[in-house]
Image (tube, rainbow, N blue to C red):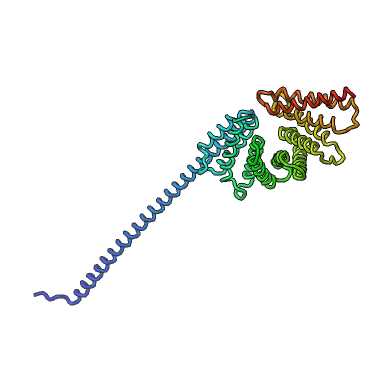
Amino acid sequence: MEEKDPTRQPVAEWLKSVLGKLKQNLHLAIIISLTSLFATITVAIWNNYKMDLRHERAREVQEVQRDRDRLERIFESGKRSGRNLEEKGKYDEAVKAFQQAQRDVTRAAMPESWATLQRLQGSALVNHALASKGPMRVRLLDEAVKALEDALVVHTPHTFPEGWADTQQWLGRAWVVQAEAGSGSSREALLDQAVHALRNAAQTYTDYSRDWANAQSWLGRAWVNQAQASQGQARENLLGQAVQALRQAAETYTDRSADWAATQSWLGRAWVNQAEAGEPTDGNNLPVRAERALTRALEVYTRDEFPQDWATVQFWLGRALLQQAGAVNDLAAEERARLLGQAEQSFRKALDIRTRRDWPDQHAEIQERLTEILRLLGEGEGT
């Protein structure tokens, strides 16, 4: 029997131990490799996910921006189209253009632009009302006030002060015109609201800007209307405020625009009212001042382009000339006759537009003035 070599047993055990360790290390290496591979795959998947997420977000941002750009184009197009139509006197079409734009430019999507379109609707409706009369004027003014008050939900003095001031100004205009068609306590309340709104606008605008001048002009108009329902010192104060506001507005305008003409017209009316109240003239003849202002208004208010405004100015010019004829006792007979003749001519021009059928009250008032002129002329011939 062969004997075992005692030296070979430790070697075999050592090899067995080495192989065992190699096997363990191989398992560990495989585990490590698999773990590393899994981690690499996981990181790659995560990075791809983040990249896809960034791309998705970028696409969403691009889509939002494209949609906003689209809405902005619709807004600008609708605003431009509406204004162009309004300048041509196509007020109904202008309002429809603004409303068409609002089908996309909603309050939820673009609140500031939506509110601007509301204000533009309101301004177009006010201008349409000024060119209308009777029930249509009343309806248009109601619609204008509704549109403008809706705009104020977004255009607040803190968030959008300029838009708020513009809306306040147009609200003031609407309330003034509503008051001119009304009477009693409702008229007084409307004029109070108008004065408050127009003061808000004037205080927000930069001094001596055109918007500021417009607010001052309508504020003067509101005060003239308030003075008509007042007496004594209150009337005198209101007319004084009106003259100051209207003169400031007239001096601010840099062109002979319709706004300038309207300011001159109301300035002339204020001076006529002051003269009728027997207020001091500060060394100047109030009826003469009124005549000059009203004559300036006629530089813009032509019969062909502004027939209603032209007729109104002719009526007030007749009153100013009639006041001049009766203001001075020692006025030469020839001068008095000249003034009375010019007054009669102005009143008759007004009658061409202020017909009995369409304007019964004003037609009757003009007839009364003409009767007074005929009486004065008769008295002059008898002396």
Q: Quadrant of residue 285?
A: top right
Task: Give residue 333's position: percent from left, percent from top.
Answer: 90, 26
Q: Quadrant of residue 245?
A: top right
Q: Residue furthest bottom?
A: 6
Question: Can you give x and y, in whole percent of width and height, for residue 221 in the image?
Answer: 71, 38
Q: Is residue 282 left or right of residue 88?
A: right
Nearer to the camera, 371 or 105: 371
User: In the rendered image, is residue 39 in sight?
Assistant: yes
- Farthest residue, direction left: 1
Q: Is residue 328 left or right of residue 13?
A: right
Residue 274 % position (x, y):
79, 38
Q: Is residue 210 visible?
A: no
Quadrant containing the N terminus in the rendered view:
bottom left
Query: Residue 287 versus residue 330: which sits nearer the camera?
Result: 330
- Depth check, front residue: 312 or 278: 278
Q: Is residue 203 left or right of residue 289?
A: left
Q: Is residue 12 above or below residue 277?
A: below
Quarter of the picture containing the C terminus is top right
Residue at the image position 43 percent from the left and 49 percent from the top: 53
Residue 20: percent from left, percent from top: 24, 68
Q: Residue at x 12, y 76 (%)?
A: 3
